[in-house]
Image: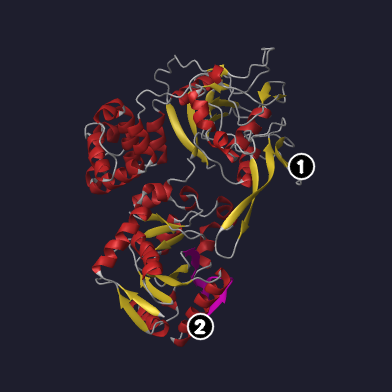
Amino acid sequence: MTYIELPDHGQRDVSFYLSMEEYVAHHVDAADCFFMWQVEPSVIFGRNQVAEAEVNLDYCRRHGIRTFRRKSGGGCVYADMGNVMMSYVTRGESVGFTYNKYVTTLLLAFRRIGINATASGRNDILVDGGKVSGSAFYQTHGHSIVHGTLLYDTDMDNMTSAITPPSDKLQSKGVGSVRSRITLLKDHTDLSLGQLKDALRRQLCDGSVTLTPADIRSIEAIEAEYMSANFIFGKNPPYTVARKQRIEGVGTVEARIDLRGNTGGYLASAVQMINEFLPKDRLIVYTQGRKSPRQEYRSDGRGSYQHIPLVVLIDEGSASASEIFAGAIQDNDRGTIIGRRSFGKGLVQQPIAFNDGSMIRLTVARYYTPSGRCIQKPYTAGDEQSYEADLLSRYKHGEFFSQDSIKHSGPAYHTSIGRTVYGGGGITPDLFVPEDTTGMTSYYKEASMSGLIIQFAYNYTDDNRPKLSEYKDIDELSAYLNKQNTVEKFVRFAADNGLRRRNLMIRKSHKLLERFINSRIIYNMLDEEDWIEYLNQDDPTIDATLKVFSEGKAFPEPSADKKGKQTAKADIAYSYGDTHKTYTMVAYA
């Protein structure tokens, strides 16, 4: 095995070493390559994971812990200078063979240096029953890449606080069980961390290659993708949050479930969330296909929020599990749906994995709401272009701006109290709120969708943290940022990173840009609740939601409209004056 060395010993980030793996796979002519690396406190999550569901982002921001996404699957891991990360690159082989070769080689090396290690499962290494190493795998251009951890003297408090276990594990096992499943190598050997690394290198490698400065520049070019905020967070669905408001004579009412822009998730998670709001034995959703018999999902009556007023927010970006949630609430007349018609993705897909790490998803059934509506938008065989351009077509026909432009191609159905709803793709809201295009330009769209704003805000926060730390609440920090001309600073940053300066568009979009930029800085410095409060200050859909709550109209009533017209337009010309507002997180979607 060939050890890959760097020409210097400078401190580098996780993103560099992940890029180095790719570069070695493509450019180093050796059958098996290996290198070890250490980083300042960081969290690395897998290709298919949602950062917010795996990482305690608030804790990481407060403690300067960086977050990164890798291209392999597997779970979320924590790394610091008290552990060692290992990278193994080999020529194209099957997943099972590569893992077996990697783990077997490591076990033999451990035993030769006096550490009694054993294998558990496919990719874990244990010492005295405690896990000291795990690994993840992916393939690229005919090579297999395995990266693993080696726990020597990791900061356990940081690790358990930075990585957020799923809620069911927290409830059943608690954080203590995470500690009990792992052990630190320092407790099983007299070798220092440096001595351990040297010993492993001697046992594993019989030669070395030192990369050149030109190689480093090439690796840094690859690193740009890993550093991109769009790569790290771009595929995450947004938070689902609630906004509380105290209404005189009523008390505190809650909840809002915000699914705008939420592209969905797992069916099981959606069913569990819906179950919290429905009485016993209500139909939540069912699936059915040509060769897949009908399968129903019903509430068990043990939900904690069966009687509180409920509003669900959706838009054209709400899809899949988000639509299941909205459809179940609407058809059971449990709450009011506000926003714009959802995307229309209701296919049940079965993943089929292959040995090379690739996968296909085979459609086997469709999702149906309790009233019988098919969530999936229509598709005509051979007309892929119309299907792919559906959102653009809806935009051009004015559906985002006028309720009268919503065209239903499916039949009418009825909710539990007889309200008319429509099939034909997506969920149409009970209360329509048009898209606000004031200030919208192609420059703003590119700036927001490219991840440049998030990256700029991250850099700005890091560069100005001492000053920003002086402001402890949203009002103070927001007032300070409004005086810092963050838009102009972003525009210069964006120009240096490929987004051409467009002065007329920037002036038109100045308010939107400033709001987005400042919101991300607030998010970095404070917490999610402050970030949400800042964004909600001038959100017309939130205003419509609060009006529904204040007027006691969150619970639907039978429609008096005999023509079956489903949607009413939101009248948002009102004021709440000095009403006290608070915000709280209730769930992830």
Question: On the image, numbered disc 2 is attached to which residue?
Answer: 116
Question: On the image, numbered disc 1 is attached to which residue?
Answer: 294
Camera sees residue 304: no
Image coords of residue 422 (percent x, y):
66, 25
Task: Residue 302: give its label.
Answer: none
Q: Nearer the viewer, residue 475 or 287?
A: 287
Image coords of residue 565 (percent x, y):
64, 16
Q: Are marks 1 and 2 in contact (CB under 8 Å)?
A: no
Most frequent secondary structure within the magenta stretch:
strand
Select label 1 or label 2 by which is in front: 1
Local SS, label 1:
loop
Q: Quadrant of the N terminus?
A: bottom left
- Region of the chain picked out in magenta, as a range: 116-140
Residue 518 found in image quarter: top left
Q: Residue at x 58, y 65 (%)?
A: 355
Q: Earlier in the sequence, mark 1 or mark 2?
A: 2
Q: Tell me if 14 is positioned left or right of 497 in this view.
A: right
Image coords of residue 153 (percent x, y):
39, 71
Residue 10 found in image quarter: bottom left
Few, some or many residues within 10 Å of mark 1 (<14, 14–19, 20+): some
Q: Nearer the viewer, residue 228 or 148?
A: 228
Kind of residue indicated by mark 2: Asn
Q: Tell me if 584 is positioned left or right of 211 in this view.
A: right
Kind of residue indicated by mark 1: Arg
Image coords of residue 401 (percent x, y):
48, 21
Query: Does 120 appear in magenta?
Result: yes
